[in-house]
């Protein structure tokens, strides 16, 4: 157990009897631990284990703590692990604001307060005034920012990044890296990043663990 951060406590993940990942690391709040490795090395499976949606084809042991909460003792919906994937995965039938309202905790009560929380979250990612936009009208970079705002407005305990920059072109990739890591620090979140891109690891700072070598 660790206070004030994320602890991967003797975590091991295997498939078909072959161990893919073995890790025992702590990630302080506001810091990032990067897991690097080629495709199929188990990077995304580690995130899935932390988030609570690991495919049952895999076997896993160990525990994950965030602050004094054992995440692995909770169902996925109660872990509050904020996840960004390669695709923004916005709900196409909802407006930009509707996507954020969906993630907003229920203790933010009342239409006015909820709308204000959404507007503040969008302003934080430089999308002020775009709550009524249709996601289909957004650029790739804007969609990525909405996805980040949706995660942050949900008040996650930790931020999990599954190569979220890989489908952006080079200038947008740099901008999104800077934005994501800056907002993670602003929100004092421990971050677990999986990637095969050395530039992602450099931008994240912090420790790097290499797997599948």
Image: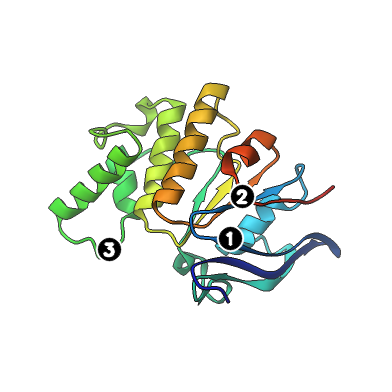
In the displayed structure, does residue 89 sit left or right of residue 56? left
The percent coordinates of residue 93 (x first, y second) are: 35, 40
According to the image, label 1 marks what residue? 27
Q: Residue at x 56, y 77 (%)?
A: 73
| Res. 164 image quadrant | top right
Q: Few, some or many C-alpha atoms within 10 Å of disc 1 (few <14, some 14-19, many ≥20)?
A: many
First reached walking from the N terminus: tag 3 or tag 2? 3
- For this rendering, which residue is in front, 156 or 198? 198
- For this rendering, which residue is in front, 187 or 59? 187
| Nearer to us: label 3 or label 2 | 2
CA–CA distance between discs 1 and 3?
28 Å
According to the image, label 3 marks what residue? 106
| Res. 195 image quadrant | top right
In the displayed structure, does residue 104 sit left or right of residue 194? left
CA–CA distance between discs 3 and 2?
34 Å
CA–CA distance between discs 1 and 2?
9 Å
- Local secondary structure at mark 2: loop
First reached walking from the N terminus: tag 1 or tag 2? 1
């Amino acid at each position: 157990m660790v206070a004030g951060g994320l602890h991967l406590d003797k975590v091991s993940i295997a498939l078909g009897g072959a161990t893919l990942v073995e890790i025992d690391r702590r990630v302080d709040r506001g810091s990032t631990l990067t897991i690097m490795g080629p495709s199929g090395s188990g990077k995304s499976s580690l995130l899935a284990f932390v988030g609570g949606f690991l495919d049952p084809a895999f076997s896993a042991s160990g525990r994950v703590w965030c602050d004094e909460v054992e995440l692995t003792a909770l169902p996925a919906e109660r872990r509050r692990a904020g996840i960004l994937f390669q695709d923004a995965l916005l709900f196409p039938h909802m407006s930009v604001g509707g996507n954020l309202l969906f993630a907003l905790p229920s203790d933010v009560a009342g239409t006015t307060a909820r709308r204000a929380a959404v507007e503040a979250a969008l302003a934080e990612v430089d999308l002020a005034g775009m709550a009524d936009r249709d996601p289909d009208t957004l650029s790739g970079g804007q969609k990525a920012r909405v996805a980040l705002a949706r995660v942050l407005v949900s008040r996650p305990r930790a931020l999990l990044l599954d190569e979220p920059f890989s489908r952006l072109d080079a200038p947008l990739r740099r901008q999104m890296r800077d934005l994501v890591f800056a907002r993670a620090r602003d929100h004092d979140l421990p971050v677990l990043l999986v990637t095969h891109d050395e530039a992602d690891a450099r931008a994240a700072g912090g420790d790097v663990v290499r797997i599948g070598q």
